[in-house]
Image (cartoon, helix red, strand yellow):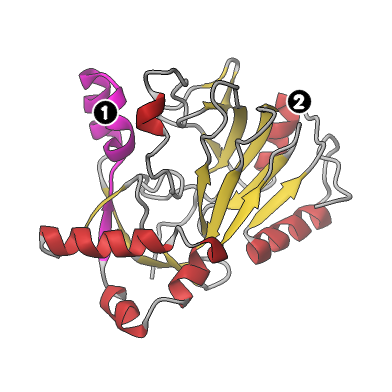
Amino acid sequence: MSGVDLRRPLDSTAVSDLKDALFRHKVLVFRDQDITHAEHIRFGRYFGELEGHPVTAHVPGHPEILHIEAGDGLKLTDQVLPFLRPANKWHTDVTFREKPSFAGILRARTLPDIGGDTLFTDTAAIYSDLPDSVKNRIESLDAEHDILQSFGWRITEEKREQLRREHPPQIHPVVRRHPVTGERHLFVNHVFTTRIIGLPEEESKELLAYLIDRVKTPEYQVRVRWTPNAITVWDNQATQHYAILDYWPAERVMERVTVAGTDRPDR
């Protein structure tokens, strides 16, 4: 978007216009926004209350701002690259929560000369194009979402037990209705969704693989090419995203504020 200076406070009309644009387009990009940490937080709060993350590190002194490098907080090395680069990283943020986040606001801090783009995909368009037979099949199904599916392998056993206590698996509809637009969205992802409830194990795996594979179709996607001090806002209820890990040994450092969700996913 152009004509917006995020260093300055926004009036209620501008905030309303931004929310309308976000619900309509699902992803907004602002260029050349050299904002402070306080201004980043202020901008995020126009959209709602902010939340931290139980695993990803935050910027020192600013628990509302996540410090993100490479594999969602896992610093790149020659040893971890072979595990991270081929991984399917398409996801909707924090679907392991009872109320997954409403939006993410990501700011570019350190960028490689080439690469490091982020892909976003429209989960309403994906659902809309599913065959009617698949829509009928998944209409009433629920799926389990678990934080340990993504983060469990790289934390201590003590931390795993803490996460299991504080963030038990959540059950969400396979197809959710957007609380504002009313659109239907496919709501399973590779990073956090573990199984479809009520189906035999092999049938669950097969159906999940089919649905998750639809996310990879380029025609549903937009590619954000990062520039210094660019800021991207996405509707986390309506999209999935994928940070492309194609820049090693260069560095890519981002900062994100996350707008907490207010709605439990519903049909």
Whichever of labels 2 and 1 marks the residue nearer the N terminus, that label is 2
Q: Residue furthest top?
A: 60
Q: What's the residue type where badge 1 is placed?
A: Trp
Q: Residue at x 56, y 53 (%)?
A: 120
Q: Secondary structure at mark 1?
A: helix
Is 157 magenta? The answer is yes
Q: Are marks 2 and 1 in contact (CB under 8 Å)?
A: no
Separation of disc 2 and disc 1 at Cα?
34 Å
The residue to which callout 1 is attached is 153
* Number of dots carrying numbers: 2
User: Residue 47 location, x and y as percent?
Assistant: 65, 48
Q: Quadrant of residue 225?
A: top right
User: Residue 1 location, x and y as percent?
Assistant: 80, 52
Residue range corresponding to the magenta coloring: 142-167
User: Residue 5 location, x and y as percent?
Assistant: 86, 41
User: Residue 210 location, x and y as percent?
Assistant: 31, 64
Q: Quadrant of the C terminus?
A: bottom left
- Image position of 94 (left or right of 102): left
Q: What's the residue type where badge 2 is placed?
A: Thr
Q: Secondary structure at mark 2?
A: loop
Q: Please say if 31 is above or below 75.
A: below
Q: Residue furthest bottom?
A: 132
